[in-house]
Image (tube, rainbow, N blue to C red):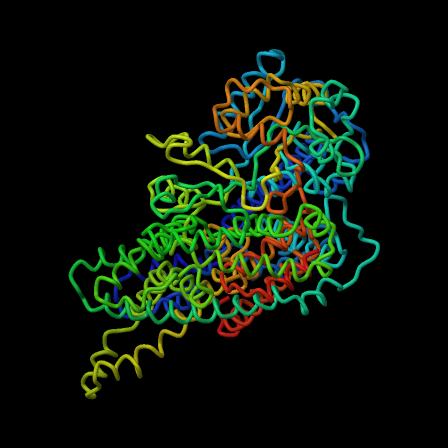
Amino acid sequence: MSSRIFAALLRDTDGSPATEGESTASDDPEVRTDGGAVVDGADDPSSSTDTADASVITRLRRSRFLESLPFWGPPGLLVFFFVYGAISWNFLISLTGWEGLGAPDYSSLSTAAYTELLSDASFIAAFRNTIALLVVFTALSLVVGLFLAILVDQQIRFENTFRTIYLLPMSLSFVVTAIFWSWMYNPRIGLINVALRGVGLDALTQAWLSDPRFKLAAIIFALMWQFSGYCMVVYLAGLRAIPHDQYEAARIDGASTVRLYRRVIIPQLRASTMSAAVVLVVFALKAFDFLFVLFGVNPGSSADILSVMMFRVAFDRLQWAYGSAVAMVLFLMALSVIGPYLYLQYRRGEL
Amino acid sequence: MSQHDPSDDAERLTRRHYVAGAGAIATVTLAGCSDDGGSGDDGSSDDGSGDDGSMDDGSDDGSGDTSELEIVHWWTAGGEQDAFNALLDGFREANPDVEVVDNPAPGGAGSAIDAVIQNRVIDGNPPSTFQIWPGQALTPYTNEDLLEDIGDSVWDDEMRDAYLDGVVELSQPAGDLVAVPINIHRLNNLFYNVSVVEDAGVDPSTIDSPQGLLDALETIDAETDATPLAHQTQSPWSSLQLWENVFIGQQSVDDYQTLLDGDVEGLEDEVRSALELLADYLEYIPEDAGSITWDQGNDGLIAGDAAFLHQGDWAAGQYEGASDFEFSDDWDMVPFPGTSGVYHSVIDSFVFPTNNPSPEATEQFLNYAGTVDAQERFNPIKGSIPPRTDVPMDEFGDFLTRQFEDFQNSDSQPPTIAHGTGVAPAIHSALDETFANFNGNLDVDAAYEGIRDAF
């Protein structure tokens, strides 16, 4: 995915969208003949009819399944054990009621942890905050990223410099940005309140990170600052893939700039929006480090999110089963975002 | 490429065979590697070894007779690290044949060490010894018999006599003696900047109740520009420990013990009244209390921007380090109002995990940690008092010497909630969460319910 983005970035407006370029490439007969397996499939039936008494072994040796096995087998096994195996094991643990430092008891399984979740006020608060963070953060980052991308796309001077400046926060670790923003938000000496006071808006100064009303909003804003640069790059790649003719055609038809973007350009950025949104949502679900650095394991119910709650329940309270149940909820949330995305990609033949 | 050339076909076949062969070899190699890893490790890092580990007793294969002593601790901040190094120097002098592996898990007050130790203990791969609060914080380990009884090997009669009963009690939460306390901090301190309180006309030594402290905070707010109480609300533990002391100050140590035993509903009015007073206190804390750490708040006290600080006596180390800030001239401390006969103890200890990689060296270390020499080296630098009552106080300075006298004359040394000795980790964590919310919303009803549900 990212390689395609950068390829699109490098390509500079050459008139063909990235996705189209790839699909035409795979239709190209010359490229296909280079793949040994495909050619092999073509002459396989002829060889089996030549020697009618071909033994089972020969056929096995020739089967594409076995021949490709060394290539996908080992990585497949590793992924199976370490990803899907770990997820299944986590689910199993969530059913055991495992607490403390002993071994889990797999003999009596129940879904008690999940029913407990539903009546746990701190889970409900964390779930609500996670959803809010996910939706607001993703939407805001996309809007800001699109806006920046359109600005940077106007053939401005120092375009590369601006692009780097906007993308730079993305390269910083959450730990760095969390500490940085805790200074920004400091109610007494932080830049935000000092700036507000400087322009006479004393009434708007707040204890951003301790007042429950603003905590989550402050976190979302800081995360948006960090990720809107990424959205900008994705959108920029999308914009560069739109042929110039379309801009010209719209202009000739007398479309205003706003109308041009709203009716012609932005609808074509659907693929960019989708891919950026999926990445953002997954990051929002994992925003653990940012909150952990700011507040430790107890952000308070106004800013608690599921990933922090999962850590708190598991490592502070040694309630491993309950923590696993929270983890499963997080997993399902991520799956419910990525699943439809992958299915859509599959339907459109991009997988 | 489209025409059929037999030589081309054959050539391609061999090429394909090469690739297939290479793939097969790679697979076999990979399998071989993982096999080696499995057997070489003796399953110590394997998933299933949690059960295996606890079944074989004490001496782990191959590593039983090494004299490498791995110590996991969280003392990585300036003064703490110096104190720990002084302890290690003393131990190396006494036991030159043991090689010490210093393996810190940084993070204030054990925020990271728990995850490290728990994982290793569950995997059956514990370090030689690790730092932990005694008392209820040990219960997850004692519940699963993960700590060796060191009642005979380490706690000889001489050592038992030297410790106060309350401290010995905390070292045996489940009956057996399993921990060696190395230091004691006092929690119920009210530090103050002498010149600020004098400017406001407040005499801390005459404040005799938690309510009286609120009046003093009001006076300071009215009379000076200083922040009355240098408190932090970024993480919940400071408010939790302040609430504990308000509770003891308003009620009694007996009521506090009843609370620790879990009878919250019987003490509803008392709990609420402490919460209400705490909410009043929190009107007088720094504007940026939610963005600072406790030591940043303490810097304000040193600079004369704040009057009072409620904190464990580790805060005094910061005063020692500040220039031109002398004990009794510039700063001083009174016991938290209403708790003068109480030495509210925050204790660190070392334990002997079962399945120990170096049983002999661990025993040597624990024996050493219980000696006068060890505690005399460690505590003056750490800013705490020794749990042994027979340690000479020459090196300790005026403040700690006074604290030590208070300790020996104290009526009771109750354990604390905020620092793990008083309640099991699950309760502690639930209370932390309650006070994280309370810091934000000052909602007494919600906090009471949180406390009730936690126990």
Q: Quadrant of the N terminus of chain B?
A: bottom left
Drawn side of residue A55 relative to residue B232, left or right: right
Q: Is residue A100 visible?
A: yes
Q: Is residue B140 left or right of residue B79?
A: right
Q: Write down the quadrant of residue B187 in the picture.
A: top right
- Residue B318 vertical position relative to residue B451 in the rendered view, above or below: above
Please give the name of the residue rendered at 39% of the width and 50% of the height, measured from the top-left corner: A179
Image coords of residue A46 (percent x, y): 61, 61
Looking at the rendered image, the quarter that the C terminus of chain B falls into is bottom right
Quarter location, residue B366: top right
Asked if residue A69 shows in the view, the reply is no
Q: Is residue B89 left or right of residue A101?
A: left
Q: Nearer the viewer, residue B303 or A313?
A: B303
Question: x and y percent of residue B250 in the render?
Answer: 61, 52
> Residue B402 at x, y = what percent?
53, 28
The quadrant where residue A45 appears: bottom right
Q: Residue furthest left?
A: A157
- In the depicted view, which residue is nearer to us: A253 or B70? B70
Which residue reaches farthest right? A107
Where is residue B281? Give x, y as percent.
48, 56
Tell how many labels.
Answer: 0
Q: Residue furthest bottom?
A: A253
Relative depth, front residue between B168 and A31: B168
